[in-house]
Image (cartoon, grey):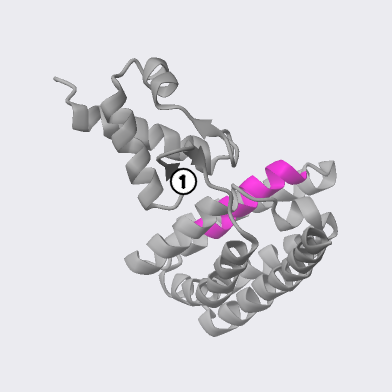
């Protein structure tokens, strides 16, 4: 198959997006077109097109004078993302209870056991990764394509920031406890109760992170 400029651009876009969202390429990293072209065995044109797409998704900042760099999320943007998750994840949980399957329950139980082990090891970085997967499974089970798209984007962006477990490792204890309750409510298909629990779960994290962000803003003003 002949690789066109458009195909090459898509391949570069996909790889750069993955590396940015995974945190491999850090915020404020300069993205030099010629260097990227060499690394991807490409001309400059597909790289430039890929960067334009990433800029349209607010992952990259492009300037005629300063070039391109990975965008750093502002405190306001992080607050906005948390607010949306706090509102929409309870809805996803309620819908997931209506569509819960034995396969979903089994996958969540497997992740839950892995999370318990990571908590015991105090491996909060890996705990954050598997915790994200736990919530992604519930969101996926909502069977609502628009809801899944919105929340998947927010969860992906979470990897660009410090998580609640990095900042407040003590919340792991209640996180483990509530994960077990999530699974039980899914088994019983109690959607309203599950939505309420998810709201409390997200609100607790949101409130703690809001306090952290407020301190960051105060420090930056000093």
Residue drawn at 53 percent across, 33 percent down = 30
Residue 145, position as x, y percentages in the image:
33, 65
In the rendered image of this protein, does residue 122 appear above or below residue 34?
below
Q: Quadrant of the C terminus?
A: bottom right
Task: Provide the residue span drawn in magenta.
Answer: 124-137
Tag 1 residue: 61
In the rendered image of this protein, does residue 108 appear above or below residue 95?
above
Q: Nearer the viewer, residue 101 or 46?
A: 46
In the rendered image of this protein, does residue 142 appear above or below residue 27?
below
Residue 147 seen in the current view: yes
**Main secondary structure type of the part rendered in magenta:** helix
Can you tell which quarter of the image residue 26 is in? top right
Residue 144 seen in the current view: no
Q: Quadrant of the N terminus?
A: top left
Task: Describe residue 115's horizontal placement relative to residue 139 as left or right.
Answer: right
Residue 203, position as x, y percentages in the image:
68, 75
Q: Is residue 87 magenta?
A: no
Can you tell which quarter of the image residue 79 is in? bottom right
Residue drawn at 53 percent across, 72 percent down = 84
Residue 213, position as x, y percentages in the image:
74, 64
Task: Describe residue 157's horizontal placement relative to residue 210 as left or right.
Answer: left
Task: Single out the residue that lies furthest toward the front.
Answer: 65
Q: Nearer the viewer, residue 85 or 35?
A: 35
Task: Single out the residue that lies furthest toward the bottom.
Answer: 192
């Amino acid at each position: 198959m002949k690789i066109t400029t458009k195909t090459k651009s898509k391949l570069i876009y996909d790889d750069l997006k993955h590396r940015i969202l995974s945190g491999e390429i850090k915020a404020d990293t300069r993205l030099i077109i010629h260097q990227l072209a060499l690394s991807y065995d490409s001309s400059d044109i597909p790289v430039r097109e890929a960067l334009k797409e990433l800029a349209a998704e607010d992952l990259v900042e492009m300037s005629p004078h300063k070039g391109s760099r990975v965008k750093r999320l502002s405190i306001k943007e992080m607050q906005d993302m948390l607010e949306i998750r706090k509102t929409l994840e309870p809805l996803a949980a309620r819908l997931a209870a209506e569509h819960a399957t034995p396969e979903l329950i089994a996958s969540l139980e497997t992740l839950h056991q892995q999370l318990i082990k990571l908590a015991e090891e105090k491996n909060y970085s890996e705990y954050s990764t598997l915790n994200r997967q736990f919530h992604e499974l519930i969101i996926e089970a909502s069977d609502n394509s628009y809801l899944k798209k919105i929340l998947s984007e927010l969860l992906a962006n979470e990897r660009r920031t410090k998580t609640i477990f990095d900042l407040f490792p003590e919340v792991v204890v209640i996180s483990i406890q509530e994960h077990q309750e999530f699974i039980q409510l899914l088994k019983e298909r109690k959607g309203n109760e599950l939505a309420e629990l998810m709201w409390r779960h997200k609100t607790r994290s949101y409130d703690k992170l809001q306090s952290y962000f407020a301190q960051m803003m105060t420090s930056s003003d000093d």
